[in-house]
């Protein structure tokens, strides 16, 4: 089988949710013809398989071949962010900015790493740097809303999320974020509508089912709450979410 055939087979396996088979294909390709792009695909498969340490090694190997490979740098920064290694994430996103100061996504990702590091003032400043470069960037506006929520300014956050949703009505995240804010404000009908809209756009977002479960629990729609909590548990596999998973499991047990 040629490297092109192996690569295509690996990509199909990854898209089909079979990271183990994808990993085997990509490793065979790398044995024959190493490239930054294949190292990136292997890292993606390893991340899907919760093999973070191996993913780090794959990304590093790809960057040894091409230190300025932006997709590899983004993948590495995102992995650091997922792994709560925020200082490393900030440095990695900064490398992208050094290569291209107009890369809005890198500014936004860097801002979110600052949020995770509880550096809210720097986070907001960094996010506004992104918006200076592209005032109509829904990704940046959504991130600004996240920062404003943590800063305790839900009214400003609602404006940011609404603008983000207006600019990109196919992005589920602003709708799901609005659902959370309206739920916190005990406006349950509005929260439900936003949550359903977000999940219609992307049915694979675990947090949406958690919010919807909370909404239905408060509306005394117990069975619907349980179903959404169960879907949250099916989808949420991040090690960082273990505590909330345990809490949701306990709620389900108490309701059944």
Image (spheres, helix red, strand yellow):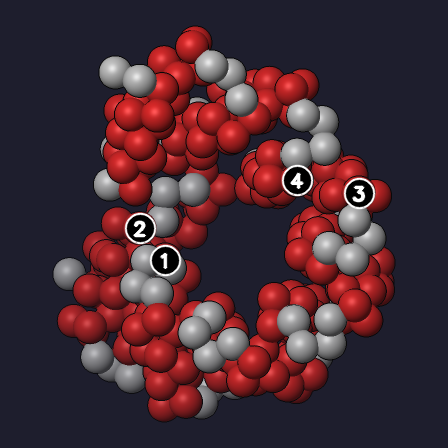
Of the 4 image quadrants, the one containing the C terminus is bottom left
- Of the numbered discs 4 and 3, the one sitting upstream in the chain is 4
Q: Nearer the viewer, residue 110 or 66?
A: 66
From mark 4 to mark 2, how far is it between C-alphas? 29 Å
Q: Nearer the viewer, mark 3 or mark 1?
A: 3
Q: Which mark is residue 206?
A: 1
- Of the numbered discs 3 and 1, the one sitting upstream in the chain is 3
Number of other residues with Cα within 10 Å of mark 3, as a class: few under 14, some 14 to 19, many 20 or more: few
From mark 3 to mark 1, how far is it between C-alphas? 34 Å
Q: Which mark is residue 231?
A: none
From mark 2 to mark 3, how far is it between C-alphas? 36 Å
Horizontally, is 57 left or right of 135 in the view? left
Q: Are marks 2 and 1 in contact (CB under 8 Å)?
A: yes
- Of the numbered discs 2 and 1, the one sitting upstream in the chain is 1
Q: Is residue 129 above or below residue 32?
A: below
Percent position of residue 162, x then y: 57, 84
Label 4 SS: helix
Instruction: Residue at 42% x, 51% y: name it.
Output: 244
**Residue matched to label 4:** 70
From mark 4 to mark 3, how far is it between C-alphas? 9 Å
Percent position of residue 23, x then y: 35, 23
**Residue matched to label 3:** 99
**Residue matched to label 2:** 235
Q: Residue furthest top?
A: 31
- Of the numbered discs 4 and 2, the one sitting upstream in the chain is 4
Instruction: Residue at 67% x, 77% y: name it.
Output: 136
Label 1 SS: helix
Horizontally, is 146 left or right of 221 in the view? right
Which quadrant holds residue 86? top right
- Of the numbered discs 1 and 4, the one sitting upstream in the chain is 4
- Of the numbered discs 2 and 3, the one sitting upstream in the chain is 3
């Amino acid at each position: 089988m040629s490297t092109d055939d192996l690569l295509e087979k690996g990509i199909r396996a990854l898209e089909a949710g079979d990271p183990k088979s994808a990993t085997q294909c990509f490793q065979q390709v790398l044995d024959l013809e190493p490239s930054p792009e294949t190292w990136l695909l292997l890292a993606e498969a390893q991340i899907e398989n919760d093999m973070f340490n191996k993913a780090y090694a794959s990304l590093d190997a790809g960057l040894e071949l091409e230190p300025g490979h932006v997709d590899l740098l983004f993948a590495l920064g995102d992995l650091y962010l997922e792994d709560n290694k925020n200082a490393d994430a900030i440095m990695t996103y900064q490398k992208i900015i050094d290569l291209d100061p107009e890369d809005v996504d890198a500014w936004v990702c860097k801002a979110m790493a600052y949020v995770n590091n509880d550096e809210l003032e720097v986070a907001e400043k960094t996010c506004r740097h992104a918006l200076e470069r592209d005032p109509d960037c829904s990704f940046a506006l959504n991130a600004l809303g996240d920062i404003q929520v943590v800063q305790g300014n839900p009214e400003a956050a609602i404006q940011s999320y609404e603008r983000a949703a207006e600019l990109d009505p196919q992005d589920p995240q602003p709708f799901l974020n609005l659902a959370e804010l309206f739920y916190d404000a005990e406006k349950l009908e509005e929260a439900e509508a936003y949550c359903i809209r977000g999940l219609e756009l992307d049915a694979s977002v675990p947090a949406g089912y958690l919010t919807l479960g909370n909404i239905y629990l408060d509306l005394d729609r117990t069975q619907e709450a349980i179903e959404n909590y169960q879907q949250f548990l099916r989808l949420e596999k991040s090690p960082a979410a273990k505590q909330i998973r345990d809490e949701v499991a306990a709620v389900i047990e108490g309701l059944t």
